[in-house]
Image (cartoon, rainbow, N blue to C red):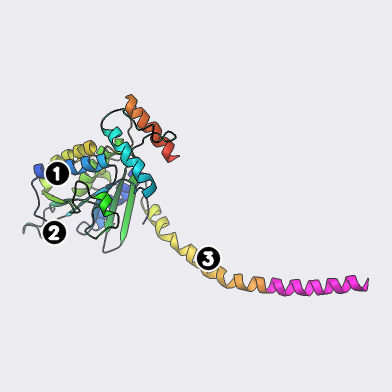
Amino acid sequence: MPLLPTSHAYLEQSALLLQAYPDTTRITTKYNFPSTRPSNSSRKQKSKPASTSAPTTTTETTPQAPPTTPLAYLTLKTYNPTTGICLKYRTNKAAEVGRLITSLGKLAAGASVAELGLSNPVPAAPAAADVEMADAPEDTSAGASTPVVPAAPAKGDAGGKGGKGKKKGGKGRR
Amino acid sequence: MPAPLSHDAFFTSLSDLLTKTSQKSRGSVTLTQKPLLHPTPDSSSKPSILIRATDGNTNAPNPKAHKVEKKKSSSKVKLSTVAAPEELDAFYARYAEVCKAGMTGLKKRDRKKGKAKAKGGAAKGVKA
C-alpha cells in the first residue's frame, strides 16, 4: 500500500489506475483526527471549547502544554479491489483540500493524466515498478541470510574452543 | 444504505457532519466515490458517480463508547448521492467548497489572525 509523496504523483497514478479499471476503482477520502490516548483525552476535551469559542483558555489546568486542537489528516485512497492496487496520499494542509477535491472530480469524470491539468508530468512506470519490486529483494535476502546465520556461530564456537585450548597448552609449556 | 439524497440535502448533511467532527476534534469522516454501475441502458456514456459519506462510527460495541457517544447515539451516519456525468463539474465545485469549509481541523495556511497563529505554533510544538 504505497503512500505517495506528492499529491501530484497520487493524482497521476490514480488517473492511470482509473483508466485501466474505470468500473471497479473507487476513491476514498478520509478526514480524520488521530485517535487520542485515554490520558490525553481529558485534556483535549477541555481544550475543545477554546478552539471554537474564545481565547478563554485552560492554561491553569495545563500550564506546560497550551491548549491545542489535534490536527486532522486528510487521506486519499484509490483502491481497485480486483487487482488489489491501492494508492494513498496523506496531507494535513487545509490549502490542499480544494485542489484535491476538484482533482477528484476530474478523476471521477474519467480525466486522463493530461486532462488533470498537472504540469510537469512524470513518467509513471518507474514509480510503479519500484513499488512492486520493493518486496522481492527483502524476501530473497532474508531467505539467503537465514541459513548462514546459524552456521556462522557454530563455526566460531568451534574455532574459539580450539584456539583456547591450544593457547593454554602453549602457555603452560612455556 | 439509505436511498441517495438530493445534492442539496447531501451537502447540508455533509457540512453538518464535517463541522461536528471538526468541533469534536476526534473521529473521522469517510468519503467514497465510485462509478454507479448498472446504469440506464445507454451505458455507452460515462456512468454516474456515486458519492458516499459516513462517519467512522462502527456499530460494534466499543469499550470506550460511553465516552464517545454524546451527540450521536452510536448510530452510524450514512449519506449518499448520485451525480450524473454532466453535472459532475458543478457537483465537485460545491463538494470542494463544503469540504474546505468543513475540514477546519487541518493545518491552516495563513496565520494572519492571532488565534490562528497560536494554533499553528501549538500544532508545530505537538508535532515536533
Q: Residue at x 19, y 58 (%)?
A: A23
Secondary structure, magenta segment, majority class: helix
Q: Quadrant of residue B34?
A: bottom left
Please tell me how many numbered marks the rendered image carries: 3
Q: Quadrant of residue B36?
A: bottom left
**Are callouts 3 and 2 both on one chain?**
no
**Residue occupied by mark 1:** B13
- Mark 1 and mark 2: span between their CA atoms? 25 Å
Crowding at label 3, few (<14), some or many (≥20) Cα neighbours within 10 Å? few
Give the letter of the chain under mark 1.
Answer: B
Give the letter of the chain under mark 2.
Answer: B
Look at the numbered disc 3 and give the secondary structure of its residue: helix
Residue B37 is tagged as: 2
Q: Quadrant of the C terminus of chain B?
A: top left
Q: Residue at x 67, y 74 (%)?
A: A154
- Of the residues under marks 1 and 2, which one precedes in the sequence? 1
Q: Residue type at mark 1?
A: Ser
Residue A141 is tagged as: 3
- Mark 3 and mark 2: span between their CA atoms? 45 Å
Q: Which residues are magenta?
A: A155-174
**Are callouts 1 and 2 both on one chain?**
yes
Q: Is residue A97 left or right of residue A134?
A: left
